[in-house]
Image (cartoon, grey):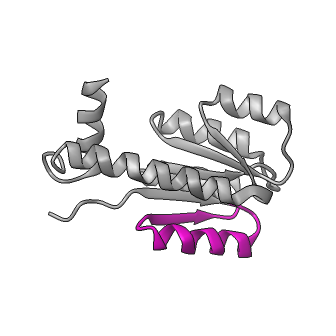
């Protein structure tokens, strides 16, 4: 059985930026799902298992913080990242309260460094699990949680 690729939900109302980060995630071996607003993202999260949600803060229908909150209500174990061009201490605090990471779009280099480290941790978990029972992420996560 081929290991399942981690699935990332990318949410941004700027189509060009969304396409750009989608391509970068796919080059790194992720399966991607995209949404151009919070409502679309929530509908996707109702139907698909997501490992990571990368969400823009300012969107026309709802804030990224509200979007992440609603997605986490459906999928509590999901990892999430808030991207914004409009950062500030209050946004950082709210993001941390959601157990999410926060990056400013002007500093995408640090985001890609974060992603590289997160990918390495996931690969190490799967390798340590011997690609788990069925060689998929769910089994590796279960084994990783048992170790904690």
In this picture, residue 113 sits left or right of residue 140: right
Q: Quadrant of the C terminus?
A: top left
**Highlighted magenta segment, given as a residue range:** 12-36
Pick the residue in front: 59 or 94: 94
In this view, 146 is above or below 17: above
105 relative to 77 in the view: left or right: right
Q: Residue at x 67, y 69 (%)?
A: 18
Q: How many labels does the image show?
A: 0
- Let me know if residue 28 is in the magenta part: yes
Residue at image point 77% right, 45% down = 63
Q: Where is residue 38 in the image (x, y as percent from the top left)?
A: 69, 52
* Residue 45 locus on image (x, y percent): 51, 50
Q: Which of 4 and 44 is in front in this view?
A: 4
The magenta stretch spans residue 23: yes
**Residue drawn at (39%, 56%), measured in percent from left and top?**
6
Give coordinates of residue 131: x percent, y percent. 18, 51
> Which quadrant of the rendered structure holds the N terminus?
bottom left
Q: Which residue is drawn at 57% across and 70% down?
A: 22
Of residues 119 and 14, the one nearer the viewer is 119
Left or right? Give the position of 126 relative to 31: left
Residue 129 shows in this picture? yes
Q: Which corner quadrant of the image does residue 100 belong to? A: top right
| Occupied quadrant, residue 24 | bottom right
């Amino acid at each position: 059985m081929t290991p399942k690729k981690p699935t990332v939900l990318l949410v941004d109302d700027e189509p060009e930026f969304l396409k750009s980060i989608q391509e970068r995630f796919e080059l790194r071996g992720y399966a991607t799902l995209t949404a151009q607003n919070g409502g679309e993202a929530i509908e996707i999260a109702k139907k698909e298992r997501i490992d990571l949600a990368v969400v823009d803060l300012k969107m026309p229908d709802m804030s990224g913080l509200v979007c992440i909150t609603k997605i986490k209500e459906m999928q509590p174990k999901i990892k999430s990242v808030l991207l914004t061009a409009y950062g500030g201490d209050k946004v950082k605090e709210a993001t941390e309260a959601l157990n999410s990471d926060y990056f400013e779009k002007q500093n995408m280099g640090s985001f890609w460094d974060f992603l590289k480290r997160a990918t390495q941790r996931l690969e190490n978990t799967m390798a340590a699990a011997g690609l788990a029972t069925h060689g998929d992420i769910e089994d590796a996560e279960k084994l990783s949680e048992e170790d904690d």
